Amino acid sequence: MKKRILLGVISGLIAGGGIVGCGEQKMPAGPEQDSGTAAELNADWPKLTSPIAKDPAIEARIDTLMAKMSVEEKVGQLIQVEIDSATPEDVKDYHIGSILNGGGHFPNSDKHASIADWVALADAFYAASMDTSDGGVAIPVIWGTDAVHGHNNVIGATLFPHNIALGATQNPELMRQIGAATAAEVSATGIDWVFAPTLAVTRDDRWGRSYESYSEDPEIVRSYGGKLVEGLQGIPGSKSLLSDKHVVSTAKHFIADGGTENGIDRGDAIMSEDELMKIHAQGYFSAIESGVQTVMASFSSWNGEKMHGHKYLLTDVLKGRLGFDGFIVGDWSGHQFVNGCSNVSCPQAINAGLDMFMAPDPNWKELYTNTVAEAKSGEIPAERLDDAVRRILRVKMRAGLFDAGAPSERAFAGDESLIGAPEHRAIARQAVRESLVLLKNNDNLLPLARDQRVLVAGDGADNIGKQTGGWTITWQGTGNENADFPGATSVYGGIAEAVESAGGSAELSVDGSFEQKPDVAIVVFGEDPYAEMQGDISNLAYKGERDLALLNRLREQNIPVVALFITGRPLWVNPHINASDAFVVIWQPGTEGGGVADVLFRDDAGNVSHDFKGKLTFSWPNDARPEVRNRGQNESLAQFGYGYGLTYADQEQMAALSEESGLQQTDANEALAVFNGRALDPWSFQVTDAGNNRTVIANSVVKLQGISVQSVDRNVQEDSRRLQWAGEGDAIAGFFANSRTDLSSYLNNRGALVFDVKVDRVPNDAVNLGMNCGMDCGAEQPITDLLEGAAPGEWKTLAVDLQCLAKGGAKLDMVLSPFYVRTAGELDLTIHDIHIASGAEDVDISCG
Ligand code: BGC
Ligand code: BGC
């Protein structure tokens, strides 16, 4: 746990304020926030009105309640805890307003928890929130969950294709049905609130959450966002609105989560306000106009300022101009990355307009205690506290929670027939059919006749975990087996059903070997599941050598090949396309794999009953270089442009595509300098001080909280940096970038991180040397002993085997920070000449 939090701090440094403009042209900055004075509103933001008007009766009921609430009770409403780090007793004692279950968190930590288990846990938390035996007011707790492609934490649920696939359907109406089906399944578990839709407009497909985005184009995101909200919450003005079979919806992650520099998860969106409005805000406009009741703040920053602390965007724009009168929830301890905040104290976020802390970590009680103190001292003004509480109570009342009784007493709770209901699966299967994008169909190989001998190959053929992607039962979607998906159909399952019912045969063979030569081979392959942070990549190459070999092997035997590519984003697959006769992007279709066969095969009468309908809503790359390619941006770098997608009517033959990846092989024989008197591109020298404030160091002398930095001379003027830690708490100094560097060639070539160091005061606490590759990605090596053993005032060269850092969790192909030093103790250290070298003979830190 400890390591995780610390890595979080490092990543905050990467994604945080400091790095604006490093190596990039700085865009106009967002309005100054620290002063607390309202920035002048840019009048280009539209003035919106939610269709759910304020109800005077609700407002009066809130007045009455709030008049009876203590500061402690009010602060409790502002805190959302996680089911694994809080008990119902805690909810009662701390007057907690909300709970969530994170991805892969289940009742009793049981992946196979039953519907009854979910409802029982919801009941327990509800009962605790309504327990007034100690005096005080009864306010029902609200439970939120990530039902982002169906109720994806629950065994047996209908799982829809991920958003990128839904975008390809070009069918906004379908979103309403998907939302309604999801809401029904969530209602069955007694849960009130869903953290969807994601309204990210992904601009750089290296981002590991690209698949959660409907499109790189704001138009689609806008046309979908409101519809999904209406599906989940019900239609404003109708009886369905927030009725029993509906749930509260969340527009997330506000704002520009999909616009971060180099597609770095939780990174920095460096852009003008105009771009923010025209691209990244569009989905929020339709969500608000459909009555969305909650918005989740993004982990990311806008022009270096963390969204969790962004008063202008949260308060002036969202709550002011855009007329949002629901509440803003944080994202997974995201408040800790606001300058000056920690995981357990962040009045800055509340004062900026955040209404509810998402506080999943076990230390949430400290956050509660500190927030109570900050409210009592006036650091959080009483009006702000009251406004936040009012907003939370308003949403709870609108959702009917005050009158609904215990979850188990609600109309659909415990109704197992809703989980994976046939009518929901039918919607999902339709979504699969409409989302498939046909990139190539030489000799009109497709559609296929059903009465054939079909070989179904590839590791994605009969692999429901793979076809459902991230946010599936577990957080990253890893570790699932077909048995975890009762009622689901694999791609192979759907094909087998289609051909066998028509007298054909389907042979499943992952490696493509067969007994009898097939008439046609269908090869299913592609990306394995991933989710936030872990899904980021450094270039657009699909690393599928084994799949390519399989395709080639089949073709060499004169078997026509249909490739079905499972992916969460466009990737460069030209070699695989060349090796196939027909190539279909099937995205991550979810549990209803039968939708694939519906389109690939003719019907019984030999007709086409479902043609291809899907069109790319993401531009497909013509090489693997890490370039941004979007509608209206670098369109010449697209192999298949926005809107591309063949149908059965198309006849063209596709000639062989270029197989030049465009990637340069780095020369691992040449050392790569990180610091040689100045930080080398793309890195900048940055410090996070003991008060969690991030600073890019440009001046020669900088004194920060608990750490000071000075440029000093070793051989020539200012060729070294002296770092003095005062022992006032954890502080970090090092080299960070907003773009990734691939150091993997060094790794395989006896690579080492090498630097010169002089110790003028030995450490009195643990010192770690770190390398970072993003949030929760990186490694640290203790160097305390090496520094303690150093002769004071004498220079020495230290080398750390890159293998140690790789083994410790650093992904060397996507490094953001190649070098940083962290300690909470006292230390006086001067560094000089930092580089990555290969062929290292002697290393000071080795890992065998
Ligand atoms: C994600 C959110 C999610 C939340 C709760 C965060 O890490 O960014 O999308 O809703 O966790 O699981
Ligand atoms: C949780 C996710 C969450 C993530 C954020 C995971 O442990 O299960 O829901 O989004 O942490 O770091």
Image (cartoon, rainbow, N blue to C red):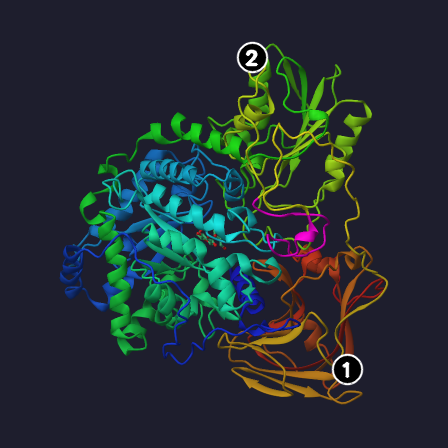
Q: Is residue 473 left or right of residue 382?
A: right
Q: Is residue 324 visible?
A: yes
Gap in angstroms between the C-alphas marked 2 and 1 = 83 Å
Residue 398, horizontal then vertical, whole percent: 23, 51
Q: Nearer the viewer, residue 531 or 353?
A: 353
User: Please, is residue 317 above or below residue 528 in the view?
Assistant: below
Residue 258 is one of the magenta-drawn residues: no
Q: Which residue is mark 1?
A: 795
What secondary structure is the magenta-colored segment mainly? loop
Residue at screen point 72% across, 17% down: 519
Q: In the image, which residues are magenta?
A: 617-638
Q: Nearer the viewer, residue 389 or 451?
A: 451
Instruction: Please tell me in which quadrant of the rendered image residue 677 appears.
Output: bottom right
Q: Is residue 16 left or right of residue 742?
A: left
User: Please, is residue 329 above or below residue 834 in the view?
Assistant: above
Q: Is residue 230 left or right of residue 387?
A: right
- Residue type (three-letter) at the residue carrying disc 2: Ala
Q: Nearer the viewer, residue 522 or 734?
A: 522
Query: Circle 1: is it few (<14), some (14-19), or many (20+) Cα within 10 Å?
Result: some
Q: Which residue is mark 2?
A: 605
- Residue type (three-letter) at the residue carrying disc 1: Trp
Q: Is residue 421 visible?
A: no
The quadrant of the rendering that contains the C terminus is: bottom right
